[in-house]
Image: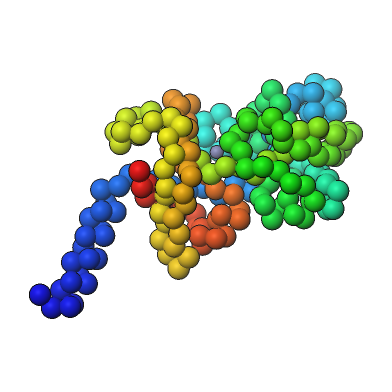
Amino acid sequence: MSVGGDVVDRVVQRVLQTLSRPMVELEASGRHVHVSRAAADALFGVGVPLTPVADLSQPGQFVCKERIGVVGPKGEFPAVVILGPERSETQVEISATDALALGVKPPVRLSGSLAGTPGIRLVGPKGAVDVDHGVMIAKRHIHMHPDFAQKHGLMDRQVVSVKVWGERAVTFDNVVLRVSPQFATYMHIDYDEANACGFHKGMLGSLIV
Ligand SMILES: [Zn+2]
């Protein structure tokens, strides 16, 4: 077989391999805060509800109209978005680049794993709150509906790799699956990761299990 034929074979093989893998759509999450009711009381006034302005891809999750300041020892972001609904604990999700600008050293964590994370100051129109923990760099993850997981033989908490293509093609390792009937199937990365892979809206990645 000619050299050209070999190349064609390899390309066809790769396309077939790719097509047989599950594909997920990526979403890039900018810095944001989930607030507890106690924090919302202090920031916006006692009992003042959050104001939803846009739905997120995950059912029941929404972007709020309210913005707050996030103030670290070295820098601050004046108008950080709040994602609702309220949570039992306040959680501040930032990129590693944001962490450098703020002067904090948060660990990479899955949402909700707040033990041992650093605190930070939050500033709202009605007051400020110093949370003593809750700042994290979100660990990349895939929200997955059980139907998708079952179809592809995947399990909650399974760790996979995800390959994306393009000029800055990259494979993300250590991607955690989070399977729940409350989830729509999307992979979440932060802005550092989005910039590293040339993210664009609608970008797909293929799972390597
Ligand atoms: Zn997520």
All told, the count of numbered labels is: 0
Residue name at image x 61 percent, y 38 percent: 109
Q: Relative to 159, does residue 166 appear above or below in the rendering?
A: below
Q: Against 186, is 202 above or below? A: below
Question: What sort of colour scheme is used for the picture?
Answer: rainbow
Left or right, 169 with reference to 98: left
Task: Choose top left, top right, bottom left or bottom right for residue 66.
Answer: top right
- Left or right, 178 with respect to 46, comes to left
Is residue 116 shown left or right of residue 167?
right
Residue at the left extreme, as displayed: 1
Specify the quadrant that holds the N terminus: bottom left
Q: Where residue 39 sits in the image (x, y, percent)?
A: 80, 28
Where does the C terminus fall, quadrant-wise? top left
Q: Nearer the viewer, residue 135 or 54?
A: 135
Q: Ligand 1: which quarter?
A: top right
Tell me what residue is drawn at x 66 percent, y 50 percent.
95
Closer-to-camera residue (105/196): 105
Q: Is residue 128 above or below residue 199?
A: above
Question: Residue at (15%, 73%) from the top-left corner?
Answer: 5
* Residue 202 visible (yes or no): no
Q: Position of residue 7 (x, y in %)?
A: 22, 72
x then y, percent, for residue 80: 74, 45
- Image quarter of residue 51: top right
Mark yes or no: residue 153 visible. yes
Coordinates of residue 101 in the picture (x, y in percent):
77, 55
Comparing 188 with 170, the one in front is: 170
Looking at the image, the residue that sits furthest to the front is 116
Q: Residue at x 65, y 28 (%)?
A: 85
